[in-house]
Image (cartoon, rainbow, N blue to C red):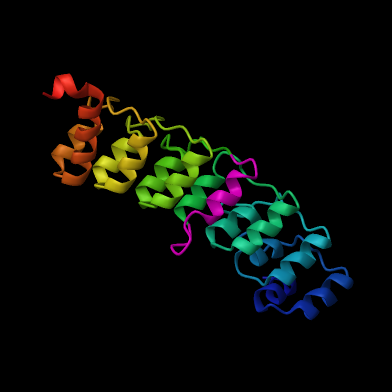
Amino acid sequence: MTSLHEAVQLGNYDRLLQLLEAGTEIDARDQEDNTPLHVAAAQGPRDCLALLLARGAATACRNADGHTALELAVRARNLPAAELLLAVRAEYDPRLILHLATQFAEPSDPHALVRLLSLSGALLNGRDRSGRTPLHQAVIARYAHTVRTLLERGAALDVQDLQGWSPLHLAALAGAAEIARLLVEQGANRALLDQRGQTPLAYAREHDHAEVLAVLLMADQADAGPATRG
C-alpha cells in the first residue's frame, strides 16, 4: 500500500492533496492491484474520490479481481460514489454491472443502484457465465422491488440460463410468490421448458410451493376462459 492509498483509506483529504501536489503517482497499485481510486470508490469519503477524479485518476484500471472503481463502488453499495463515477463517465463492463448491482444491493433500498445504472446505459439483458441476466439475479435475491424496476426499464422476461431456467423458473424454485405474480402479470411465458423438460408449474408442484402454484394455476385458468373452466 502506498502513501496515497493510506491517505484515502484514512479519509485524510489534506494529506491526499499534499501528496498529489508533490507529484505522487496517482494510479499507483497496491498488492491487490487497487489504485487509490479503487479504495476511494469502495470505502473512502466522497471528497477524496472527487479530488482523485479532478486530478485525472484513471477510471479504466482494473484490480486483480478484474474490477474497475465503479464496479467496486457497486459491490460496496456506495451509491454516492457510484453517482459521482457515473457523472464523469467512469469505465465499467456494461454487460455485467447490473449483475453486481442486484447481487450487492442495499437491503433497505435494493433497487436504488439498479435504477441508477439502468439509466446509465448498462445492459439490462447482459448475461454472466451461467447465462443469467440481472433479472435472474434479482429473482434469486428475492428483491421484488428490483425485479419491478428492471421490468419497468424493459428487461427481457423469458431469457433462459444454461440450465434452461427463466426468471419464472427461479421464482417457482424459490417459492417467491410475489415475484412470480409480477412476472406473470408482465406476460412471462409459463410454458417454457428447461433442460430437464420442466415448466415453472412443475417446479412449484415438486417443491410444494403452494402460493406460487396458486399464482400459476390462476393464470392458466384465466387464459382458459370461463367456458373451459366450467
- Residue 8 is situated, as x and y percent measured from the top left of the image, at 70, 73
**Horizontally, is 14 left or right of 224 in the view?**
right
Quadrant position of the N terminus in the picture:
bottom right
Q: Is 120 contained in the magenta span? A: yes
- Residue 86 is situated, as x and y percent measured from the top left of the image, at 69, 52
Q: 74 or 2: which is nearer to us?
A: 74
Rendered view: 11 above or below 90:
below
Q: Please report the bounds of the magenta region as a residue range.
A: 105-122
**Horizontally, is 38 left or right of 203 in the view?**
right
- Residue 216 is situated, as x and y percent measured from the top left of the image, at 23, 35
| Prevailing SS of the magenta stretch | loop
Q: Residue at x 72, y 76 (%)?
A: 7
Quadrant in which residue 29 is drawn: bottom right
Q: Residue at x 53, y 58 (%)?
A: 75
Q: Is 219 contained in the magenta span? A: no
Task: Check the image and name the residue furthest to the left.
Answer: 230
- Residue 229 is situated, as x and y percent measured from the top left of the image, at 14, 24
Task: Check the image and name the residue furthest to the top.
Answer: 227
Q: Residue at x 68, y 75 (%)?
A: 6
Rendered view: 202 above or below 5:
above
Say whether residue 205 is visible: yes
Quadrant position of the C terminus in the picture:
top left
